[in-house]
Image: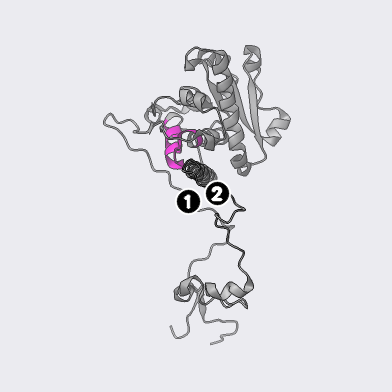
Amino acid sequence: MDNTGYLPIAAAQPWSFRPPSPPHVYIPPPTLDKNGNPDIQLKVKSDHDFDASGFSNNDFLNTVSLGDYQAGSGIFEWKYEARRKAQRILPFLYLGPLTAARDSNFLQSNGITLLVAIRDVKTAVARVLGSKAAQELGIPYAAVDTSGNQELIAAFPHGIEIINAHLSAMNQHNNGPSTARKVLVFCESGNERSAAMVVAYLMAMYSMGVIKAIQFVQAQRFAVAFDDPMKVLLETYASILRAKRDVLEHDRELHAQITRATTAGFPPLQASSGNSWNPKKRSLGKDDDDGMDVDGDWSMADGGTIEKREGFAPFFDTAGR
């Protein structure tokens, strides 16, 4: 038997000859209430920190966000033709395709006061997502332009600011009911970029998680479609929001501690004073205290746990099998 070129090894795991992809993010179907409708309720939290959303008019946003909302039963009432129309996600926020933005009857009958287009840069240059109907009706038009879905995470705060600034301006000039202030967020299909913007709005303004926000939007507009990269992007944005809220909470607690100390007669803490903890940078001579050798011996780092970690062998020996 000729063993020329034969190596007695084999792969430990199946190989995949494709670019790496993000892990699958599973969005489970929502639970149902006793009437068979999606049991998804958007609750306004009394301790919600609107500053973390990037919009400072907290008093106004509390009035806009006043009350809890129950997701509709669009999942079971959905018809294929509904994808060409816009659906109400919140009393003041609609989501839909370009056809809805160009429908004069829809804009008038639903009292839309602002159109927000989530566009690709190439589409913006070609002016494809314009709305002659909005111009004829005198409805303001705004756009959030990105060169790809990955840029959406940086565009979310801008889109949220556009929506809230419009609602705030309307509130200052109109003392009527909140139903007079309505925004339509749209893209070509109404199922991808614009849907992601609405999900991001729910996460920022109502402290909703990614899964719950997607379920809430899908309960109204069943046609929305999020691939795994988009879900990962939304989860990343959720992490950013959590970090901003944690920082704000820490800063406020620190401010409260300083205020209490000052009231009690203690001098306020200062970064340059000896009262604050300001550790010096670790010198090379101190590295031995952390269990590391400067020359690169990390065997004792992390309490010696690295030595105990089991490695993963990509191949195994098949000789003798």
* Magenta region: 204-219
Apparent side of residue 102 relative to residue 89 in the rendered image (left or right): right
Of the two numbered discs 2 and 1 on the same chain, state the one appearing first in sequence.
Answer: 1
Image disc number at residue 191? none
Between 94 and 86, the one lying in front of the other is 94
- Quadrant assignment, res 185: top right
- Is residue 187 visible in the rendered image? The answer is no
- Quadrant assignment, res 147: top right
| Quadrant housing the C terminus | bottom left
User: Is 14 placed above or below 141 here?
Assistant: below
Furthest toward the bottom, the residue is 1
User: Is 110 placed above or below 20 here?
Assistant: above
Given this view, does label 2 or label 1 mark the residue nearer the observer?
Answer: 2
- Is residue 141 visible in the rendered image? The answer is yes
- Quadrant assignment, res 165: top right
> Residue 72: x percent and y percent?
39, 27
The residue lying at 47 percent from left, 51 percent from top is 24
Q: Secondary structure at mark 2?
A: loop
Q: Amino acid at mark 2?
A: Leu
Disc 2 to disc 1: CB gap under 8 Å: no
Q: How many marks?
A: 2
> Residue 110: x percent and y percent?
50, 16
| Residue corresponding to mark 1 | 24
Dominant secondary-structure state across the stretch colored magenta? helix
Q: Amino acid at mark 1?
A: His
The residue lying at 42 percent from left, 35 percent from top is 47
Q: Secondary structure at mark 1?
A: loop
| Residue corresponding to mark 2 | 269
